[in-house]
Amino acid sequence: QAAQMAVPEAAFILHGGDMTGGKRTDWQYFYYLNQDTLMNTLIAPAAGEYDADGFTDYFNVGDTGYYSFDYANVHFAVLNTNEDGNQCISDTQLAWLRDDVALARENGAEWIILNTHKGPYTSGSHAQDEEIQGLREVLLPIIDELKIDLVIQGHDHILGRTYAVKDGKVTGKTAYTEMVNGKRFEYS
């Protein structure tokens, strides 16, 4: 509700996963509590580990839980990071991502945004998890190869930002200012 009130003209909500505990009653509660928001906007979710089992039953995202869509000149690829315990994502899905982004570029996408639940970098509690380190090894080279512009992830339930990163190293620093709850934060 807060997101929709803050940006009522938003075309959709991009969600980073962990919407429920995964039980049928949790899904019913999720839809009941959010019915006003969900009736007035689209939601493009990623499957979190807590809701992974029922995710494809409750969202029309195909059987795999990974999918993509275009909005204006932006292509969104949404991954399912609940597939392979050692690296969070299967080789089949990585091949799909390569093909999907190549086709999007051919079709004129100017920006590629990757939405995923578990992501390669975080300042939260999952940073050193073995599966996240495995995800880093397989996904980061592909992000660089495909020149993905932005990665959004939800696993740690925090707001964090990084500088541009390539091969695990900061490639440039961009200063920006952000207002959060009326307070000004400056980053350099």
Image (tube, grey):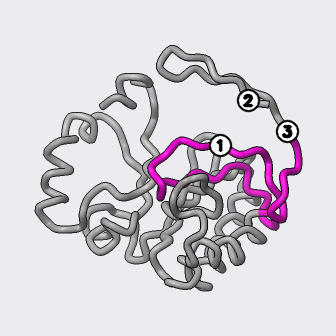
Quarter of the N terminus within the rendering: top left
Please say if 18 is above or below 95: above
Q: Are marks 1 and 2 in contact (CB under 8 Å)?
A: yes
The furthest residue to the top: 182
Please say if 72 is above or below 109: above
Local secondary structure at mark 3: loop
Camera-side residue of 48 and 54: 48
Q: How far apart are marks 1 and 2 (CA)?
A: 10 Å
Please give left or right for residue 127 compared with residue 154 in the image. right
Q: How far apart are marks 3 and 1 (CA)?
A: 12 Å
Please say if 167 is above or below 72: below
| Residue where numbered disc 2 is placed | 187
Quarter of the C terminus within the rendering: top right
**Rendered residue at 11%/61% (across/down):** 25
Label 2 environment density (alpha carbons within 10 Å; few <14, some 14–19, many ≥20): few
Q: Residue 52: horizontal and vertical position, in percent?
A: 34, 71
| Residue where numbered disc 1 is placed | 161
Amino acid type, callout 2: Tyr
Magenta stretch encompasses residue 36: no
Q: Which of pointers 1 and 2 lies earlier in the amino acid sequence?
A: 1
Q: Magenta part of the protein: which range?
A: 144-172
Q: Residue 178: horizontal and vertical position, in percent?
A: 63, 24
Amino acid type, callout 3: Lys
| Residue where numbered disc 3 is placed | 173
Q: Which of pointers 2 and 3 lies earlier in the amino acid sequence?
A: 3
Q: Are marks 3 and 1 in contact (CB under 8 Å)?
A: no
Please give left or right for residue 33 compared with residue 151 in the image. left
Local secondary structure at mark 1: loop
**Rendered residue at 24%/38% (across/down):** 39
Amino acid type, callout 1: Arg
